Amino acid sequence: MAKPFAAYVVKQVKRAMQNAVSDQEAIFRDLLKTGTVTQFGKDHHFSDIKTIEEYRQAVPIRDYEAFKPYIDQIKEGKHNILWKGQPMYFAKTSGTTSGVKYIPISKESMPNHFNTGRNAVLCNLGEIGNPKVFDGKMIFLSGSPELERVGGIPTGRLSGIINHQIPSYLRTNQLPSYETNCIEDWETKLDRIVEETISRNMTLISGIPPWMQMYFDRLIEKSGKKVGELFPDFSVLVHGGVNFEPYRTKLMESIGRKVAAIETFPASEGFFAFQDSQHAEGLLLNTNSGIWFEFIPVAEIFSEKPTRLGLREVKTGENYALIINSNAGLWSYNIGDTVKFVSTDPYRIVVSGRIKHFISAFGEHVIGEEVEYSLMKAAEETGVLITEFTVAPKISQDKGKSYHEWLIEFDQRPANMDLFAALVDGNLRKKNIYYDDLITGNILMPLQIRAVKKNGFIDYMKSVGRLGGQNKVPRLSNDRGLAESLEPWVEG
């Protein structure tokens, strides 16, 4: 049954590629029409708005903190605040400045979350060449499906909410069990997942790369076999949440053979893009799924009136802050991610970083995409395997003594650490001209690497209660907070 359904989905996706601009404009009109009856729409005079430009004049860019007064009204039980009626769910997620965030999910927005992940797998099915992937067991490393009620609204982690939406025809293939998924302690949960899956016919495994690696490590430790040998029919790895490249080499080595990797770009606020082909660069922007996108050049994101672009105006190769307007009631919402178009026919993107995750302590504005490229290129050239890493500035009062400090956990260390550091530094200088100028001008020393002990990042995440689930280690910090917290796990 998967093959004809996959053909249908591929046809629909290709049609959306061709109609991306017109679909986006239609979604804008539909959102505006529904939004007119909401408190937000009344506050921003939606009934008077006729054009996109008028909308942009009326509705400024917001982050969660600016939305919080509206969310609080929903939590008080009020209706028609951001979207018609009340949300179907609240997706509960952690924020850096707002504490816990409650992201509304409406009846209309739910298909975006579920169908997009399904479409990602089905679009790749023909290229993968294994239509029997749905005949085996599938695992989704996710948060607990147990929900609480906030203001009468079912509330929990997005991955747990999606668990409740899985259709019955897939539930018989789904692992781990509901009881195991409800375990809060990540390491206890992981041990139970290993017990439940080690003797099953696993064909698809999905999750955030660092936590998939932990799962693979436990499987190998318990069985003495590579994951691909343990699961002969395992052929699809679905990943998202962080850039896959720093984890790819070690994950594939743990598997012991090549499997298809499908990248996705989901968040509590929506499912924005997915890899629709094993042969095309980037992720296909989800242009017909209830979200109208805007794009702001990264250099203008903190401007009072930044340039706001639609699909017609974007260019390849430029970094944009991703802004969404959704049928869950998020209006001109800054999700905090930056993207870069690698194609505009069709519209494909790569996720280039986080707005708040950068280093510009000296004016260099180094972003996640640049540090990941610099490290992975050096690792590939030297045969080094990386487990995890983060970068922070080390500021000295003496001229020419400041530098970027890289805290790296190696699975396989470089034979010559100084040479490896020089390679990474050289790659970054080629990637970022401002960083190169600071090195050339003797404002900065070349970067320095400090090795983190085995499982150091895992132990750190455990110590701050952020092990497992959707939690991720920031690649970049513009201060020393994370670097200093990691000191107990740094070698030497």
Image (spheres, rainbow, N blue to C red):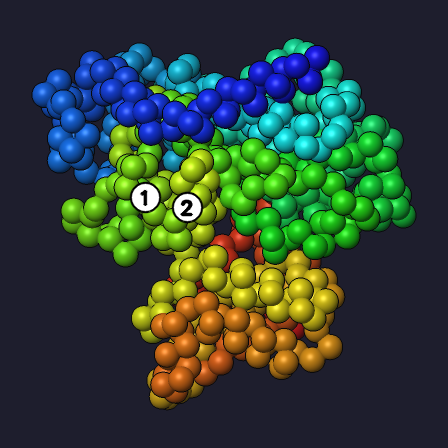
Which residue is the extreme one toward the left?
48
User: Of 311 and 477, which appears nearest the observer?
Assistant: 311
Q: Earlier in the sequence, mark 1 or mark 2?
A: 1
Which three-letter amino acid code belongs to the residue tagged 1? Val
Residue drawn at (46%, 40%) of the image = 348
Spot occupied by residue 87 in the image (x, y as percentages of width and height):
37, 18
The residue that appears at 87% across and 31% down in the rendered structure is 199
Q: Position of residue 305 (x, y in %)?
A: 16, 47
On residue 97, the disc is none
Mark 1–mark 2 CB contact (< 8 Å): yes
Marks 1 and 2, how far apart in space?
A: 8 Å
Q: Quadrant of residue 47?
A: top left
Q: Give the quadrant of the C terminus.
A: bottom right
Residue 386 to residue 306: above or below: below
Residue wearing tag 1: 314
Q: Is residue 94 among what the camera can see?
A: no
What residue is at 86 percent from the left and 39 percent from the top?
Answer: 230
Image position of 91 (left or right of 330): right
Which residue lies under the disc numbered 2? 341
Q: Does 208 sit above or below residue 476?
A: above
Mark 1 residue element: loop
Q: Quadrant of residue 71?
A: top left
252 lies above or below 23: below
Label 2 crowd (10 A; few <14 / some 14-19 / many >=20): many
Amino acid on which the number 2 mark rests in the picture: Phe
- Give left or right: position of 405 versus 322: right
Query: Which residue is painted at 20% across and 52% down in the image?
Result: 303
Q: Nearer the viewer, residue 404 or 244?
A: 244
Decide if residue 67 is in sight here: yes
Q: Is residue 135 left or right of residue 278?
A: right
